[in-house]
Image: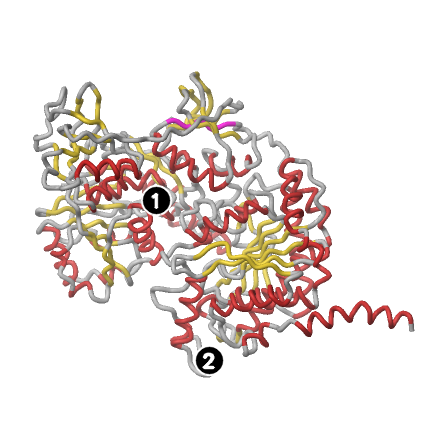
Amino acid sequence: MKKISGLLAFLLPLLMWSQSIKSPSEFLGYEIGTQFTRHHEVVDYYQYLASVASDRVQVKEYGKTNERRPLLLAYVSSMENIKNLETIRTEHLKSTEGSSNASKAIVWLSYNVHGNESVSTEASMQTIYDLLTTKNDYLENTVVIIDPCINPDGRDRYVNWYNQFKNTPNQVNPDSKEHHEGWLSGRANHYMFDLNRDWAWLTQVESQQRLQIYNQWLPHIHVDFHEQGVNNPYFFAPSAEPFHEVITPFQRSFQETLGRNHAKYFDANGWFYFTKERFDLFYPSYGDTYPTYNGAIGMTYEQGGSGRAGLGVITSIGDTLTLKDRLDHHKTTGLSTIEVASKNADELNEEFKKFYQPKNYNYKSYVLNGDMDKKESLISLLDKHGIEYGWGKKGVVKGFHYNKGSNGSIQTNENSLIISTNQKKGTLVKVLFEPDAKLSDSLTYDITAWSLPYAYGLDALASNSLVTSSSKDKKQLIPVVSENSYAFITDWNSMKDARFLADLLQNEIRVRSAEKPFTSDGKKHDRGSLIITASDNKNHKAFSTTLGSLAKKHSKTLSPTATGFVDEGKDFGSGYVKMIKPVKVGVLSGDPTSTLRFGEIWHFFEQQLHYPLTVLDASYIERTDLSEYDVLILPDGRGYRGFMDDSMLKNIKEWVAAGGRLITMGNAIAAIDGKKGFSIKARERTKDSTDLEVDLYENEQRERMKQAITGAIFKTRVDPTHPLAFGYGDSYFSLKLGNDSFEYLETGTVAYIENNFKPVAGFAGSEAQKTMAASLVFGVEKHGRGQVVYMVDNPLFRGFWENGKLFFVNALFMIN
């Protein structure tokens, strides 16, 4: 009888809790898994839990999306832990300093980073409900942080689309419209960016706001819930090779521990799954790798489904996959993860502390010289990641020289940026800054090179020694604009300069650009330098005030001069000092473009350059009067062969010949390759005897890799005298994403790969390297009174290749 009384005493609180908390189905008014839940309803449910179980749940809004949807985090744990949540957090972070007595496991679950992988958010609601009712014993020594929807804009886009087009009841036939999203799918965020590729680069507001909170917790475990193709079973840890070399033996083995626990539940239910395939741990900007490089057990869980699955779909083997099935699978791995964490809390804390002990990495310090604007842009990123840095002193440092591709030395001074691996974020520093990440397997899921010194165009050296550095105060620039000056001169090297120009033009200030280097008042100025004369702006009523205000806004130094007569070079009235036109720009959207590539351009104009852009959809562009536009951009995409028919090509060629400027990117170039009137030509791949050999079926994928380039960095030669290259030297490191190759132009080849050039970082197959030899990267072809700009490589890729962006701005403003 005493045993029964004791059992009742234990179960009664659990029964009261479960009875007092509504399940997602009870709260929403429909059985969860039978409909898709809109974001505001998800928010309502989490806020409801925070109100009825406030002793065990806290919900905080950490930001808003571009479309003003709230971003939420839910903290769920035992009453005692929630009461001491801040103490638990601060004690946990002491582990990064090696002095903690932390005992709680911290688990962060992230859902729906891809909006149309829509089961994740549904699963999050059932998971937190189960944690509060039937699985609350896991929470005694565990704090669970749940982000129910990383990408609300994309998710609502998908859910609204699906609800508009689905049959009633839903149709499981995969041919049905409800299984075929249009061009503007729900996968990406508002700007069509893939948020699962943005953890390290932080170009998007969702990523920036989330990482502020993530770095305040640095959990032991982070899970990123995804979906894959409908015909795939479930994927969970362990991950596939390649693993980055910084990943610790414990991080590897604990993935195995988690995977075996998940398998126990999947086996019991007869569910299919796979591990150690496809999803690797290398590229640093994923929701599994970025947490891993910050000490967590970072993992991707992939359920079959995605935007093709809807509420139910028949798979290729004749089974019906339902939203309920998908929900159960994600709920199971989520709860299994928390269960394992709870059982291994002590080991997680101990190993997390070990991760942050000093590392003896080969390169101890990274030294960066170059344009201060570019260094400031990099510093902005470092600050967001909590990476420490300092400034050098006069001297010489030896090590691996990035520009030379070999050992050498670099002169340092008080403006040399120093970043050391001897800090809390030292592992992340190594991953982001090392010249060429060690690749254990060429079969990777994403790009294989990203080194930030190359991406930011800085003169860098990796040193085997610890380079001392110190802090310095940032000086506040207060530009003075004298009304008596003949003109004002400023440099042209960076995106800060580009934003300044864009602002000037939109404020109706007329600006010129120097095509030749010149010296004025004893100071040398490079090609592309901006010249703002009082005479050009004599009709601007607030010229001096506006110029001064904009110079202060953009922290721009203006060099005043009392004369247009230069010491050396071309005077300001020369034909080589040309007026910059405030161009009207259109960009093609819809099929045949890639949503991601279109989104990069859209985001670039609105959030980086801050210059107006008109989006022209492919469905009506033939009826658009192109003479209203100075520049037309064709983003990369796969459908140009069908889109660029004779009629469209004729319209575009006539518009270019009349003075338009066409910027073509990626496959848009291939669509006009060899067409009458344009001279761009693709290079043909030459076959050798090895192409005729018979390969085993199991080797087929690796044989294809000989032709592949998986995001490798190539050193290119640049013609710095061409307006497309203003602001650049005679070389540029380009991120090459594929093996498309085009011949040099007869005239107008601006950036190009020479013969026998291998990548400086990343993987490029042996045959692909041959194709890249003597190939075009950027070029400009004159056509009538207009121009065609060819961008074989994408300088706007994922918004993080900072040093390529000025090429794109030059294509807009500097070419005449």
Instruction: Say what secondary structure mark 1 lies in.
Output: loop
Q: Is residue 224 left or right of residue 19?
A: left
Q: Is residue 319 visible?
A: no
Q: Return the residue found at the far top.
A: 395
Residue 170 numbered tag? 2
Q: Is residue 530 above or below residue 586?
A: above
> Toward the viewer: 468 or 717?
468
**Distance in Å between CA atoms under marks 1 and 2:** 53 Å
> Toward the viewer: 632 or 16?
16
Residue type marked 2: Asn
Q: Is residue 72 above or below residue 801?
A: below
Are there few (<14), some (14-19), or many (20+) residues within 10 Å of tag 2? some
Q: Is residue 38 above or below residue 224?
A: below
Residue drawn 70% across the image and 58% down it: 78
Indicate the quadrant containing the C terminus: top left, top right, bottom left or bottom right. top left
Indicate the quadrant containing the N terminus: top left, top right, bottom left or bottom right. bottom right
Residue at the spot of label 1: 688
Q: Is residue 214 magenta?
A: no
Residue type marked 1: Asp
Q: Is residue 136 left or right of residue 628?
A: right
Q: Is residue 322 visible?
A: yes
Q: Is residue 809 left or right of residue 630?
A: right
Percent across and percent down for residue 501 are 23, 40
Percent across and percent down for residue 661 are 16, 49
**Labels 1 and 2: the sequence-earlier one:** 2
Residue drawn 56% across the image and 32% down it: 423
The mark closer to the camera, 1 or 2, is: 2
Magenta highlight range: 365-369
Are there few (<14), some (14-19), or many (20+) residues within 10 Å of tag 1? few
> Toward the viewer: 366 or 82?
82
Percent across and percent down for residue 569 are 13, 23
